[in-house]
């Protein structure tokens, strides 16, 4: 059991060394894109919600 755990963690260490981590600049750029897209989607969905709410109120009177 302990030998299997040691082998597992040795393999994890080897795989972690293969990972290419993004630079700080790449991380900031990706984060900015995500935040901007979330804001755009929120504004769009909020607008659609407002229009549909008013439409339903007009229909139901």
Image (tube, rainbow, N blue to C red):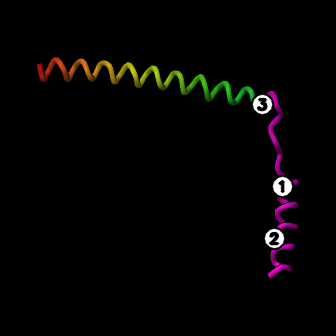
From this view, report whether residue 52 is shown above or below residue 19.
above
Secondary structure under tag 2 reads: helix
- Residue 8 got which mark? 2
From this view, report whether residue 15 is shown above or below residue 52.
below
Residue 18 is situated, as x and y percent measured from the top left of the image, at 85, 53
Q: Mark 1 points at which residue?
A: 16
Residue 57 is situated, as x and y percent measured from the top left of the image, at 18, 20
| Between discs 2 and 3, the one toward the N terminus | 2
Q: Which residue is drawn at 83% across and 45% down?
A: 20
> Is the residue marked by circle 3 packed among few (<14), some (14-19), or many (20+) residues within 10 Å?
few
Q: In whole angstroms, how far apart are the C-alphas of marks 1 and 3?
A: 19 Å
From this view, report whether residue 2 is shown above or below residue 9.
below
Is 32 on the left or on the right of 60, as rendered? right
How would you classify the magenta stretch by its main secondary structure?
A: helix
- Asked whether residue 11 is drawn in magenta, I would say yes
Whether the residues at callouts 1 and 3 have beta carbons within 8 Å, the answer is no
Q: Name the residue under label 3.
A: 26
Secondary structure under tag 1 reads: helix
| Between discs 1 and 3, the one toward the N terminus | 1
């Amino acid at each position: 059991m302990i030998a299997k755990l040691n082998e597992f963690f040795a393999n994890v260490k080897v795989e972690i060394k293969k990972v290419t981590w993004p630079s700080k600049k790449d991380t900031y750029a990706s984060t900015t894109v995500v935040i901007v897209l979330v804001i755009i989607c929120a504004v769009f969905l909020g607008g659609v919600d407002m229009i549909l709410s008013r439409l339903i109120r007009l229909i139901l009177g």
